[in-house]
Image: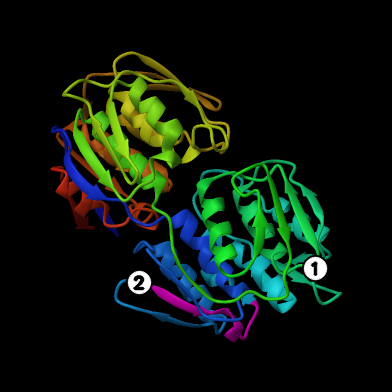
């Protein structure tokens, strides 16, 4: 099992390109199952989760071509089976996103309950209730969700989500594109990745309005066609490198990133003392050699502060000047990485879903173990600001969400390398 060996101490400096968004790419790949013609998807990140989704599509007999740049051409109409097997779905929660497209296009779907990171309960009940509202008949048996359309085609419906759910919004949005009549989604998720998915569906011929707001309207069509679509940049990857630069008192520039998708993150970085500049497709951060200031925040659905950036900011706060209060309201286990940071000399106390972080000038390198994707990134940041060597174990988590992470950090001047057990 690979690990990352980090020798901390120096500031990050330089320029890197932001990869395509994993959280946008996965639902877009699932959406190709809706089309009756080939769909070409580009700017996919080279990540394990992406290859898992491609393997899942292949396992169902879907014809696809992958070129050397990981551009994928997928012909959803060639799908021969509508079962997403446990062997693939267990490793990646986003596999549940094939449920809506399979059901809407082929009238049936059998999908194993998904797996993924150990960050807490992420039930799929909102997905199922939305599909049932459109006329789907759903049974849960032996770890599988079996869905059928008794009337041959889903029907438009008015759906109010009990809670803001990104995956539920995506699944029901995709299914509604081929439903008969109008579907209105209330209390829908507003993330940029939802907008990207909707824009791809529109390019395929879907009729969607309101994406990016809490109310999305979809007028179903009989079929969707082909298109070429480039996945949006990864705002969480971008945020991770910006926070790493802030924690190390560095100076970096990111290319191929829309700063509008990072408003909440940039505000907090400025609060920490960073000098931020940006243009249409770039962001720069300069700490001017200064130690960051502690920043308090609470994670909330977009456009508020993202849960996927909480762990990284917690690592920065561990070496910041002052005391920060961090509240995690989305996932109940997402403060788990604080125990590993305390082993490195951080001063973090946790009470329920709230962490109180008293900054210390330096951390000390230590062997640490990642529990999930974003915790992995936070421990890398902690290693970058620690004296001595930090060995981050279980980095298969980080390989699920960060493309070439050690190469990118190396180009920014970090002392980091991958080692085998």
Residue 71 part of the magenta segment = yes
Q: Would you identify the image quadrant in which residue 205 lies?
A: bottom right
Residue at 55% in and 59% down? 199
The N terminus lies in quadrant: bottom left
Q: Which numbered mark, 1 or 2, is in the foreground of this view?
A: 1
Work out whether 296 lies above or below 113.
Answer: above
The C terminus lies in quadrant: bottom left
Tally of numbered discs:
2
Left or right for 228, reference 207 = left
* Distance between the alpha carbons at the discs numbered 1 and 2: 35 Å
Work out whether 395 lies above or below 84.
Answer: above
Secondary structure of residue under mark 1:
loop
Sooner in the amino-acid sequence: mark 1 or mark 2? 2
Residue at 27% in and 44% down? 254
Q: Check disc 1 and report the residue beneath it.
A: 180
Question: Residue 242: horizontal and vertical position, in percent?
Answer: 30, 37
Question: Residue 73: horizontal and vertical position, in percent?
Answer: 45, 78
Left or right for 32, reference 278 = right
Q: Which mark is residue 70?
A: 2
| Local crowd size for mark 1, using a 10 Å CA cut-off: few (<14), some (14–19), many (≥20) | some
Work out whether 312 lies above or below 154.
Answer: above
Question: Residue 34: horizontal and vertical position, in percent?
Answer: 63, 73
Residue 202 part of the magenta segment = no
Q: Would you identify the image quadrant in which residue 220 lies?
A: bottom right
Residue at 39% in and 41% down? 375
Residue at 33% in and 31% down? 315
The magenta segment: 70-82
Can residue 273 be seen at all in this image of the molecule? yes
| Residue toward you, 66 or 387 | 66
| Local crowd size for mark 2, using a 10 Å CA cut-off: few (<14), some (14–19), many (≥20) | some
Q: Which mark is residue 386?
A: none
């Amino acid at each position: 099992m690979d690990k990352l060996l980090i020798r901390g101490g120096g500031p990050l400096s330089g320029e890197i390109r932001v990869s395509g968004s994993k959280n946008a790419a996965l639902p877009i790949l699932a959406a190709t199952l809706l089309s009756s013609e080939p769909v070409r998807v580009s700017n996919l990140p080279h990540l394990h989760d992406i290859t898992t989704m491609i393997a899942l599509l292949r396992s169902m007999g879907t014809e696809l071509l992958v070129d050397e740049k990981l551009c994928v051409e997928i012909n959803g109409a060639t799908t021969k089976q509508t079962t997403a097997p446990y062997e693939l779905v267990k490793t990646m929660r986003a596999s549940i996103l094939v449920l809506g497209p399979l059901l809407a296009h082929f009238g049936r779907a059998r999908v194993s309950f998904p797996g993924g990171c150990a960050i807490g309960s992420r039930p799929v009940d909102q997905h199922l209730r939305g599909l049932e509202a459109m006329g789907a008949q759903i049974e849960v048996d032996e770890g599988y969700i079996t869905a059928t359309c008794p009337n041959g085609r889903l029907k438009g419906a008015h759906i109010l989500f009990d809670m803001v759910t990104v995956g539920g919004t995506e699944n029901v949005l995709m299914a509604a594109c081929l439903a008969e009549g109008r579907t209105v989604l209330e209390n829908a998720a507003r993330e940029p990745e939802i907008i990207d998915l909707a824009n791809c569906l529109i390019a395929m011929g879907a009729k969607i309005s309101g994406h990016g707001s809490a109310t999305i309207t979809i007028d179903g069509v009989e079929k969707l066609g082909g298109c070429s679509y480039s996945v949006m940049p990864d705002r969480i990857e971008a945020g991770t490198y910006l926070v790493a630069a802030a924690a190390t008192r560095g100076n970096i520039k990111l290319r191929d990133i829309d700063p509008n998708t990072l408003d909440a993150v940039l505000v907090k970085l400025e609060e920490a003392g960073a000098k931020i500049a940006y243009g249409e497709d770039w962001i720069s951060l300069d700490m001017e050699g200064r130690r960051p200031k502690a920043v308090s925040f609470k994670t909330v659905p977009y456009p508020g502060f993202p849960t996927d950036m909480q762990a990284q900011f917690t690592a920065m706060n561990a070496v910041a000047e002052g005391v920060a209060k961090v509240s995690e309201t989305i996932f109940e286990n997402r403060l788990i990485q604080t125990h590993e940071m305390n082993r490195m000399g951080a001063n973090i106390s946790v009470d329920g879903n709230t962490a109180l972080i008293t900054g210390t000038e330096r951390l000390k390198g230590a062997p640490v173990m990642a529990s999930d994707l974003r915790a992995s990134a936070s421990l890398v940041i902690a290693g970058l600001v620690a004296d001595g060597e930090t060995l981050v174990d279980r980095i298969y988590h980080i390989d699920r969400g960060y493309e070439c992470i050690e190469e990118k950090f190396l180009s920014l001047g970090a002392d980091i390398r991958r080692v085998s057990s």
